[in-house]
Image (spheres, rainbow, N blue to C red):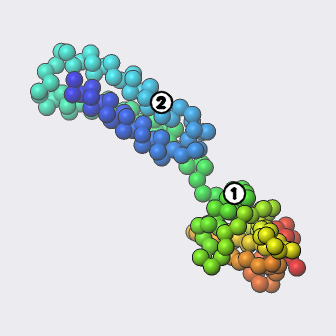
Amino acid sequence: MTRSVLLATAAAALAVALTACGGEGASDAAPSASSTVSTSARGTAPAPGTVAPTADTTSPADEEPEPVTSSAPETTAAPTTAAPTTAAPTTAAPCAVVTREYLITTLRMTASPDIPLADLQNARCSGNYATALSQPEGTLHPVVYMFKYSAPVGWRLMGVDDAIDCVNRHGVPLEDARVIGCAL
């Protein structure tokens, strides 16, 4: 009886850990990551139930055989390796994750307190640079928010201005500046 409770607890803990570590990508890459664990737990739960009536529960020898629980994580190891595919953007394609919402989140997380938060629109990205526009009430021209990607840090806010000359001021390559709309 103790063994089956231990196995059920271990399977439940493993299912919670896999679900927590998987994030959104785990449900896309392997929709049955947590169901695989629960299926394995259901498959192994009857086996200890059949062994429990024949063995006495007071001896420590019954608690020692844990290869059953160690074999369960081996069968679920494959779905957990698929989860990191939706992590941070790779250095080769940092623009792959840039959207309006992504830049708004980056602005909230990386901007200094003196920079106002804004509802960014028209997100553009090229190379390691991105821009987005905001049109505050009462202004005639949009405000440009410029972001830069670096591998160890990720996306960061570089500057905010009515018109950013990013080629001369921030060293953005001319081709990228034309795409993101900051070449003056």
Residue at figure coordinates x 11%, y 27% from the top left: 58
Q: Position of residue 70 (x, y in %)?
A: 34, 35
Residue at figure coordinates x 24%, y 30% from the top left: 65
Residue 131 vs residue 45, the one in the foreground: 131
Question: Residue at the left extreme?
Answer: 58
Q: Which residue is mark 1?
A: 101
In the displayed structure, 7 sits above or below 135; it is above
Asked if residue 127 shows in the view, the reply is no
Judged from the image, the secondary structure of the residue bearing numbered disc 1 is: helix
Callout in the foreground (1, 2):
1
The quarter of the image holding the C terminus is bottom right
In the displayed structure, 5 sits above or below 47; it is below
Check disc 1: other Cα within 10 Å, few if <14, some if 14-19, many if 20+: some
Residue at figure coordinates x 85%, y 74% from the top left: 141
Judged from the image, the secondary structure of the residue bearing numbered disc 2 is: helix
The quarter of the image holding the N terminus is top left
Q: Position of residue 140 (x, y in %)?
A: 86, 74
Q: Which residue is mark 2?
A: 36
Question: Residue at the bottom extreme?
Answer: 168
Check disc 2: other Cα within 10 Å, few if <14, some if 14-19, many if 20+: some
The quarter of the displayed image where residue 123 is located = bottom right
Residue at figure coordinates x 48%, y 41% from the top left: 19
The quarter of the displayed image where residue 128 is located = bottom right
